[in-house]
Amino acid sequence: MKGENPRHGAAFILGGFILFVFFWQAASMFLQLKALPPPLEVCAAWPRALEGGLPRHLAASLGRALSGLGLALFFGLALGVPMGCCPKADRLLGPLLYFSYPVPKLALLPVIMLLLGVGEASKITVLVLILVFQLILSIRDAVRAVPEEDYALLTSLKANFTDKLAHIILPAVLPAVFSSLRVSIGIVFSALFFTETFGTDQGLGYYVTDSQMRLDYPLMYLGILSLSLTALILFLLVDAADRLFCRWR
């Protein structure tokens, strides 16, 4: 939230974590299921998880997530800015964008694997396809929302398009970019879990599925928690970047 004290945000996250652990413990005691071990039992499995390669799987997932987010942001800016600035570009690319956006991208995973193989390229491509459309739309709409008077001021100073891009367009789209990235982080880790269950032996998706197949539930929950905490850290980093680069708000 605008103007929020970072300490209040940290207290809010800590309170949410304590509440989550409380409900987890209560559910474990009430249900008495092997598939739902208590939090302390899961925490006690950390040494075994570290020896079993959890950091390696975490690094693989993080690399894919950052690659997908970075490429989606690049293409989002490369297409969204021209579509927002130039009506002709919007008329040309808009129909293709609206036709492609509703297609379920995870359903294309088998096709992409046939075309690109089962390696990293296919997994990252799926992540990019899932994320890029909402980034393009958000950036395009943010560029469209810039008042014409702002451009007129720089035009009167004989500024070229590069000056307008640096001093008006990019600052104007940054809030939309950060907002879209927050949503994208949750989406990319959800999709990442699915893509990592195919054609790989590395990544938290594989780790969680493999642990579940071996009925090693503490390790399975550690994999899920690692996935969630990684997404949370990225989310907080986006918040920090928002506060740093959008102080003018």
Image (spheres, rainbow, N blue to C red):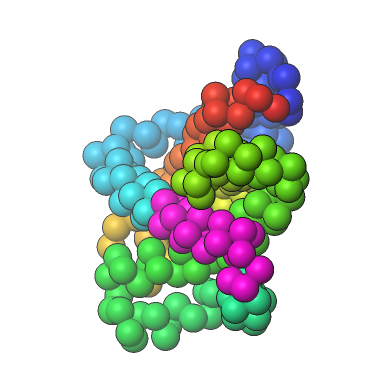
The residue at the point 34 percent across, 86 percent down is 114
For the N terminus, give its image quadrant.
Answer: top right
Percent coordinates x, y for residue 61 in the rendering: 37, 52
Displayed quadrant of residue 178: top right
Percent coordinates x, y for residue 208 in the rendering: 43, 55
| Looking at the image, residue 45 lies above or below residue 75 | above
| Residue nearer the viewer, 142 or 190 | 142
Position of residue 56 in the picture relative to residue 88 (left or right): left
Displayed quadrant of residue 19: top right
Percent coordinates x, y for residue 121 in the rendering: 31, 68
For the image shown, how many numbered marks are present on the structure? 0
The residue at the point 67 percent across, 37 percent down is 153
| Looking at the image, residue 114 lies above or below residue 87 | below
Displayed quadrant of residue 14: top right
| Looking at the image, residue 204 lies above or below residue 200 | above
Position of residue 125 in the picture relative to residue 4 (left or right): left
The residue at the point 45 percent across, 69 percent down is 126
| Looking at the image, residue 53 lies above or below residue 44 | below
For the C terminus, give its image quadrant.
Answer: top right
| Residue nearer the viewer, 16 or 123 | 123
Percent coordinates x, y for residue 120 in the rendering: 30, 65
Q: Main secondary structure of the magenta part?
A: helix
Residue 161 visible somewhere in the drawing:
yes
Position of residue 213 in the picture relative to residue 24 (left or right): left
Residue 61 visible somewhere in the drawing:
no
Is 85 inside the magenta-drawn segment? yes
The residue at the point 57 percent across, 52 percent down is 184
Is 119 inside the magenta-drawn segment? no
Task: Identify the magenta region.
Answer: 68-89
| Residue nearer the viewer, 82 or 158 | 158
